[in-house]
Image (cartoon, grey):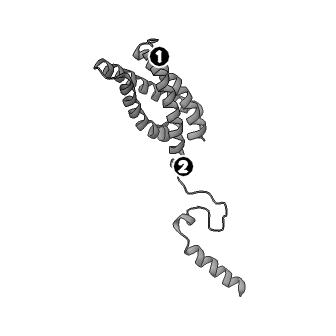
Amino acid sequence: MESTEAQQTETQQGAMSTPAQSEGEAGSDGSSKTSARPAIVRQGFFYLVVGCTSALIELVLFQVLYQFGICSVEVSNIIALVTATTYNFILNGRVTFKGVTSPVRSLIKYLILFAFNMTFTTFTISWLVGMGWDSLIAKLCTMACVVLWNFVLYRKVVFT
C-alpha cells in the first residue's frame, strides 16, 4: 500500500510540474536534465562575441590600410574582409555553430556568402566614399547590413 501511495504522489507531482520542467530543464532537486534553453541563445551570444572581435579586426585593418595611404579604399576593404572572414569562419564553425555535419559543404556555402558580402561591401563603400561619405561611416553602414543577414544565413544555411 505504501508503494501505491508513493506512485500516486509521484504521478500527481509530475502532472503539476511546470512546462519548463516537463520540457527538460533541471528540476528542483538539482538533477542534471538537458536544458530547454534554445540553442539560438547560445549561438546568438557567441555570434556577437565572434562578430565583435571580427569587426574590430576588419575595421582596424581597413583604417590602417586606407588612412595611411597603403591601399585604395577597394583593396583595403578586400584585405580587411578576407582577414576578418577567415578568423570569423574558423571561430563560428568551431564555437558558435559547432556540430557541423559537413565542414567542406559549410566552407563552400560560406565562400559563396563571402563573395556576395565582399562584392556588396566593396561596391557600396566605394560608391558612398565617392559621394563624399567618410570611409569609416561607409564601412560601418555596410558592416551593419552584413551582420543582420549573416546570422540568419549562418544558422539556417551555412553551418547546417
| Residue at the spot 43% in from the left edge and 12% down from the top edge | 69
* Residue at figure coordinates x 43%, y 35% from the top left: 147
Image quadrant of residue 136?
top left
Tell me where residue 102 sits by quadrant: top right
Image mark count: 2
Q: Position of residue 89 (x, y in %)?
A: 55, 31
Residue displayed at 43% across by 16% down: 67
What amino acid is found at the position of numbered circle 1 in the picture? Leu
Q: Give the label, 1 or 2, closer to the camera.
A: 1
Quadrant of the rendering where the N terminus is positioned? bottom right
13 up-or-down from 60: above or below: below
Answer with the quarter of the image where residue 34 lies: bottom right
Residue lying at 62% horizontally and 68% vertically, measured from the top left: 28
Residue 39 image label? 2
User: As drawn, is 59 to the left or to the right of 104?
Assistant: left
Q: Is residue 63 visible?
A: yes
Q: Which residue is mark 1?
A: 65
In whole angstroms, how far apart are the C-alphas of marks 1 and 2? 38 Å
Q: Is residue 25 above or below residue 123?
A: below
User: Picture coordinates of residue 141 (x, y %)?
Assistant: 36, 30
Specify the amino acid type for callout 2.
Ala
Q: Residue furthest top?
A: 70
* Viewer-proximal residue among 65 and 88: 65
Residue 32, placed above or below residue 144: below
Q: How many C-alpha atoms fall within 10 Å of the one at disc 1: few (<14), some, or many (≥20)?
A: some
Q: Of all residues shown, which one is farthest toward the bottom? A: 1
Q: Earlier in the sequence, mark 1 or mark 2?
A: 2
Closer to the camera, 49 or 154?
Answer: 49
Q: Are marks 1 and 2 in contact (CB under 8 Å)?
A: no
User: Is residue 84 left or right of 11 when viewed as pictured?
Assistant: left
- Element class at badge 2: helix
Q: Nearer the viewer, residue 108 or 64?
A: 64
